[in-house]
Amino acid sequence: MDKKITIAIDGFSSTGKSTLAKQLAKHLGYVYVDTGAMYRAVAYFAMKNEFINNDHFDKLSLINSLPNIKLHFQFNPELGFAEMYLNNENIEKQIRTIEVSNFVSKVAEVSEVRAKLVEQQQEMGKNKGIVMDGRDIASVVFPNAELKIFMTASAQTRAQRRFEELQQKGDTVSFDEVLKNVEERDYIDTHRADSPLVKDKNAIEIDNSHLSREEQFDQVLNLVTTILG
């Protein structure tokens, strides 16, 4: 099919945005961009350079270091999706830890960080045929996207999913710690001054608390098919 559209998927943490976006991109032959991975990469950079920890956040040093942060995605045929690279180093595994999760929303609050990454994201999607997920895709990055999805689920449900995912990876973490992280990220994401997480007026809300991945995918694919005609 010649016609291509932009699909913007926003929502709270651990709602399965990336899983859905990957499914859609693979089915449609579109480019998939995980903007959360980009913010996680910057948070990881800040941690590695001791700009941020539990006691302080040196925003100015991070801002001054932004020109030294080079991000790109590289497709891994064995995994079937693109992995995140920071300054030519594969950091896909490192950015998925609870430690990075604890700082990513704080890093994403920094206006200079958002400006740098939004510019890159818009460049990636200039030719359409893209599925992008994050917090401000429909409202800021692609306000003219043909399909806007807003995903939500209860904090308990999302924390349980994230807890099981981390356990499968062998991470030592408690459910209460994961739930606290989910709730804190929700608050920061929805209350930050620059590009807060909001449901765009044209977005279709999907509460997937009681949906399987297959049911969710079929529901959104039907929306795509309708738009493509």
Image (cartoon, rainbow, N blue to C red):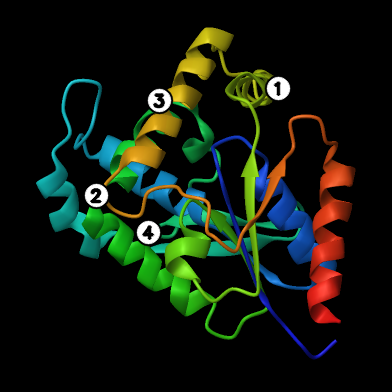
Of helix, strand and loop, which one carries label 4?
Answer: loop
> From the viewer's perspective, is residue 54 above or below residue 116?
above
The residues bearing labels 3 and 4 have C-alpha atoms spaced at a distance of 29 Å
Residue occupied by mark 2:
110
Could you say which disc has been placed on residue 168 in the image?
Answer: 1
Of helix, strand and loop, which one carries label 3?
Answer: helix
Mark positioned earlier in the residue sequence (3 or 4) = 4
Residue occupied by mark 3:
184
Q: What is the three-letter code of the residue carrying label 2? A: Val
Mark positioned earlier in the residue sequence (2 or 1) = 2
Q: What is the three-letter code of the residue carrying label 1? A: Gln
Of helix, strand and loop, which one carries label 2?
Answer: loop
The residues bearing labels 1 and 4 have C-alpha atoms spaced at a distance of 28 Å
> From the viewer's perspective, is residue 201 above or below residue 109?
below
The residues bearing labels 2 and 4 have C-alpha atoms spaced at a distance of 21 Å
Residue 53: image quadrant is: top left
Q: Is residue 166 left or right of residue 124?
A: right
The residues bearing labels 2 and 3 have C-alpha atoms spaced at a distance of 17 Å
Task: Name the spot of residue 178 as percent of width and height, x first.
Answer: 52, 18
Quadrant in the picture for the C terminus? bottom right
The residues bearing labels 2 and 1 have C-alpha atoms spaced at a distance of 32 Å
Of helix, strand and loop, which one carries label 1?
Answer: helix
Could you say which disc has been placed on residue 209 in the image?
Answer: none
For discs 2 and 4, the disc positioned in front in the rendered view: 2
Q: Is residue 203 visible?
A: yes
Residue in front for this viewpoint, 122 or 149? 149
